[in-house]
C-alpha cells in the first residue's frame, strides 16, 4: 500500500458515488419530475435544528439540509464530470492541432489561449452566467468556455516533447503516417499529465460552481446544490448573542461535504501523479 | 534577453486587444437596453431608457455598423470613460479609484503568508523529507488546497469572530473610521494600514491590522497551499541533483548547501506559477471581500454580477485582463532572468 492517502481518497469518492446513485432512495423527491427541488417545510426565515423529520436540520426558508446534501452530491458529480470532460476534450483537440501543425497556426492558437487566460475565471464565469441566465447548464457552459486552456497548453507541451523522443522517431522511420503516429504513439503518452490535471479539476470545478451559487449567480434558488446550501448559511454563521454555535448545522454540514469531495479528488490526483512520476517532469 | 522582452512587450497589446474584442463580442449578446447603459453616464438618462429607446439607440449610435460601434467604444475606453456603474452609484472609473486601494491592501498583505508559508515552509518541508514536520505541513497544505475559500471564510468568521470574538469582519472599526475621516488624518494612498503608518497613527494601524488578519489568511490559503506543494516538490528534485551531492562532498555545511545551491534552483518552479497566483488572488478577492465586507474591487464585481451592472462588469473584465497579462510578462522576465536556459530559446 504505497499510497494510503490515495486509497482514502478513492474510498471517499466511492462513498460519494454511492450516495449520488442512491439519491432517489436516500432522499425521495417531493415532486416527481423535479427531484432537484429541495422540499420546503414552511417559509420561516430561521433555521431549525436537526430533528426526526429533518435529520440535518433546515436552512433559512426551511429547505431540508439532508435532502440538499444528498441530491447536491448528484449535481456535484454531474457538473464536475461534464465540465471536466468537455473542457478536457476541447483543450486536447486544440492543443494537439496546435502542437502538430506548428508554425503560424501554433502561434495564433497560443495567443488565443493567452487571451482566454487573461480573463478572470470567477468574475468571467459570473458575467457569462449573468448573460446566459441562471441555471446549471449555463454554469457548465461558462465553466467550460473559461476552462479549456490548461489542457490545451499541457498537451501541446507534452506533444512537442514526445515528438522528438526516440520511439516516435523510430515509428516514423518505420513508415508510420501522421494519424497513426498521433493516435498510437504520441497521444497515449501525452495524455497522462492531462489526466492528473483533470482529477484535480474535478474538485476545483465543484468549488467554483459552488462559489457561483454562493454569490447568487449559479443554480436557481431552491436547487439542490452544495453552494446553495452554503449561501443559505451565510447569515447564520455567528449565531446570536450568547450562543454563536446555535446554527452550526447550517454551516458545517454543507462545508464538510464540499471539502471532503474536493479533498478526495485531490488525494486521488496526487496518488495518480505519484504513480506516474517517472513519466512526468516538472510541477508536482 | 532584450529581444525576449521586446517580443513579449509587443504581444501585450495583441492579447489586450483580443480581450477587448472578446468582451465587446460578449456585449453584443445583451439586449439594447443593457448595451446602451455602457454609453450613458448620466443616471437620470438611464432611468428614462425604456421610454425613449429608439431615440437613445440613434443618439448613441447603436444602429451603426458593428465596427464603427467598436471603434467609438474603444475611443471612449481609451479616454477613461467606461460608463456609469449602478451598483457603485458612481462612474466606473470613479469606482476603480475608490475600490482599488482596498483590494491592493488585501493583496499586498497576502504576499506575506504566501511567500513565508508557501516557499519557506515548502523548502523546509523538503529538507526534512518524510519526517513529522514534512507530514504535518503536507496535511495542512492539502487541506488548504481543498478547502473552498468561502468555506474557509465562513469557518474563520465562525471560530474567530463568533466564538472567540478576536477578529471582527469589515475593514475598519467605527472609532478608527471616525479618526480617518477627521481632519488630522490624511489619506495619502487609500490603503488604510499604509496611511496609518504615514500618519504615524498607531491606533488606526492596529485596528486596520486586526480587521485584516482573517481575510488575509483566508485569501492566501489556496495560493499558500499550492506554492508549498510546488516548492516542496521542486526542492526535493533539486536536492537529488548531482551538483548538490558534489557540494556536500566538497565538505560544505548542510545549511550552505541548501541555501546557496539547492534553494535557488528550486525557486524556479514556484516563480513560474506566480502568475497563476495572481489569478487565484483575483478570484479569492471576490469571495473574501464579499464575506468580510471589504469595499474592494472583488465585492464590487460580485455585486455588479448579481445586479447585472454591465458597465461595471466589463470595466472589471478589462482591468483584470490587462493586469493578468502584465503580471505574466513580469513573471516571464523574472523567469528568464533567473534561469539562463530559457533565454536561449
Image (cartoon, rainbow, N blue to C red):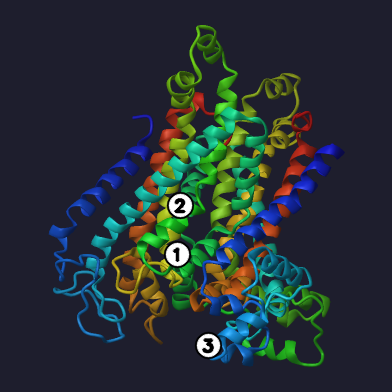
Sequence-wise, the earlier of marks 2 and 1 is: 2
Mark 3 or mark 2, which is nearer to you? Answer: 3
Q: From the viewer's perspective, is residue A140 above or below residue B265?
A: below
Q: Considering the numbered disc 2 on the image, is that residue within a helix, a strand or a loop?
A: helix
Q: Residue furthest right?
A: B2
Near-viewer residue (B276 or B160): B276
Q: From the viewer's perspective, is residue B113 above or below residue B93?
A: above
Image quarter where the N terminus of chain B lies is top right
Q: Residues within 10 Å of mark 1 (few under 14, many from 20)?
A: many
Near-viewer residue (A81 or A98): A98
Near-viewer residue (A49 or A129): A129
Position of residue B68 measured from the top left corner of the image (x, y, whole percent)? 70, 67
Q: Quadrant of residue A230?
A: bottom left
Label 3 is found on which chain of the structure? B
Q: Considering the numbered disc 1 on the image, is that residue within a helix, a strand or a loop?
A: helix
Label disc, if present, on residue B38 of the rendered structure: none
Q: Which residue is mark 1?
A: A211
Amino acid at each position: 500500500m504505497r499510497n494510503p492517502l490515495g486509497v482514502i481518497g478513492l474510498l471517499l469518492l466511492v462513498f460519494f458515488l454511492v450516495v449520488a446513485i442512491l439519491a432517489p432512495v436516500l432522499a425521495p423527491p417531493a415532486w416527481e419530475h423535479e427531484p432537484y427541488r429541495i422540499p420546503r417545510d414552511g417559509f420561516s426565515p430561521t433555521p431549525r435544528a436537526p430533528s426526526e423529520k429533518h435529520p440535518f436540520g433546515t436552512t433559512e426558508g426551511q429547505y431540508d439540509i439532508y435532502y440538499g446534501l444528498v441530491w447536491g452530491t448528484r449535481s456535484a458529480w454531474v457538473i464536475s464530470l461534464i465540465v471536466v470532460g468537455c473542457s478536457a476534450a476541447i483543450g486536447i483537440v486544440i492543443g494537439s492541432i496546435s502542437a502538430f501543425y506548428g508554425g503560424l497556426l501554433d502561434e495564433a492558437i497560443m495567443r488565443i489561449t493567452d487571451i482566454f487566460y487573461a480573463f478572470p475565471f470567477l468574475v468571467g464565469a459570473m458575467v457569462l452566467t449573468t448573460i446566459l441566465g441562471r441555471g446549471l447548464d449555463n454554469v457548465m457552459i461558462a465553466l467550460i468556455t473559461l476552462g479549456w486552456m490548461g489542457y490545451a497548453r499541457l498537451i501541446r507541451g507534452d506533444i512537442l516533447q514526445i515528438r522528438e523522443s526516440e520511439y516516435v522517431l523510430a515509428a516514423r522511420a518505420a513508415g508510420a503516417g501522421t494519424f497513426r503516429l498521433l493516435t498510437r504513439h504520441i497521444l497515449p503518452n501525452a495524455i497522462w499529465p492531462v489526466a492528473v490535471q483533470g482529477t484535480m479539476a474535478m474538485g476545483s470545478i465543484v468549488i467554483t460552481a459552488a462559489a457561483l451559487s454562493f454569490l447568487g449567480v449559479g443554480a436557481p434558488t431552491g436547487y439542490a446544490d452544495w453552494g446553495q446550501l452554503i449561501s443559505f448559511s451565510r447569515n447564520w454563521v455567528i449565531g446570536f448573542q450568547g450562543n454563536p454555535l446555535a446554527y452550526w448545522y447550517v454551516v458545517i454540514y454543507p462545508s464538510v461535504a464540499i471539502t471532503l469531495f474536493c479533498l478526495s479528488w485531490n488525494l486521488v490526483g496526487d496518488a495518480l501523479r505519484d504513480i506516474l512520476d517517472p513519466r512526468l517532469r516538472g510541477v508536482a | 534577453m532584450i529581444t525576449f522582452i521586446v517580443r513579449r512587450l509587443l504581444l501585450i497589446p495583441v492579447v489586450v486587444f483580443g480581450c477587448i474584442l472578446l468582451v465587446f463580442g460578449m456585449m453584443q449578446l445583451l439586449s439594447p437596453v443593457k448595451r446602451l447603459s455602457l454609453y450613458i453616464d448620466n443616471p437620470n438618462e438611464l432611468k428614462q431608457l425604456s421610454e425613449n429607446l429608439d431615440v437613445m439607440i440613434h443618439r448613441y449610435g447603436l444602429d451603426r455598423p458593428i465596427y464603427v460601434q467598436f471603434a467609438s467604444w474603444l475611443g471612449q475606453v481609451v479616454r477613461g470613460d467606461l460608463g456609469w456603474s449602478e451598483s457603485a452609484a458612481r462612474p466606473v472609473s470613479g469606482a476603480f479609484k475608490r475600490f482599488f486601494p482596498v483590494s491592493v491592501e488585501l493583496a499586498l498583505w497576502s504576499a506575506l503568508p504566501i511567500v513565508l508559508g508557501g516557499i519557506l515552509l515548502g523548502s523546509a518541508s523538503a529538507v526534512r523529507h518524510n519526517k513529522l514536520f514534512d507530514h504535518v505541513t503536507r496535511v495542512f497544505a492539502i487541506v488548504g488546497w481543498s478547502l473552498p475559500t468561502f468555506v474557509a471564510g465562513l469557518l474563520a468568521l465562525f471560530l474567530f469572530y463568533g466564538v472567540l470574538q478576536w477578529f471582527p469582519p469589515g475593514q475598519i472599526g467605527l472609532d478608527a473610521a471616525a479618526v480617518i475621516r477627521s481632519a488630522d488624518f490624511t489619506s495619502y494612498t487609500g490603503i488604510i494600514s499604509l496611511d496609518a503608518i504615514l500618519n504615524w497613527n498607531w491606533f488606526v494601524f492596529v485596528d486596520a491590522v486586526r480587521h485584516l488578519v482573517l481575510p488575509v489568511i483566508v485569501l492566501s490559503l489556496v495560493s499558500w497551499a499550492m506554492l508549498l506543494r510546488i516548492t516542496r516538490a521542486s526542492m526535493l528534485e533539486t536536492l537529488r541533483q548531482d551538483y548538490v551531492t558534489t557540494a556536500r562532498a566538497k565538505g560544505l555545511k548542510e545549511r550552505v548547501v541548501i541555501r546557496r545551491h539547492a534553494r535557488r534552483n528550486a525557486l524556479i518552479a514556484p516563480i513560474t506559477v506566480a502568475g497563476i497566483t495572481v489569478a487565484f488572488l483575483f478570484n479569492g478577492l471576490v469571495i473574501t471581500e464579499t464575506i468580510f465586507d471589504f469595499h474592494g474591487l472583488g465585492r464590487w464585481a460580485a455585486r455588479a454580477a448579481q445586479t447585472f451592472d454591465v458597465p461595471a462588469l466589463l470595466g472589471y473584465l478589462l482591468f483584470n485582463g490587462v493586469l493578468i497579462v502584465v503580471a505574466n510578462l513580469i513573471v516571464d522576465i523574472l523567469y528568464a532572468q533567473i534561469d539562463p536556459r530559457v533565454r536561449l530559446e
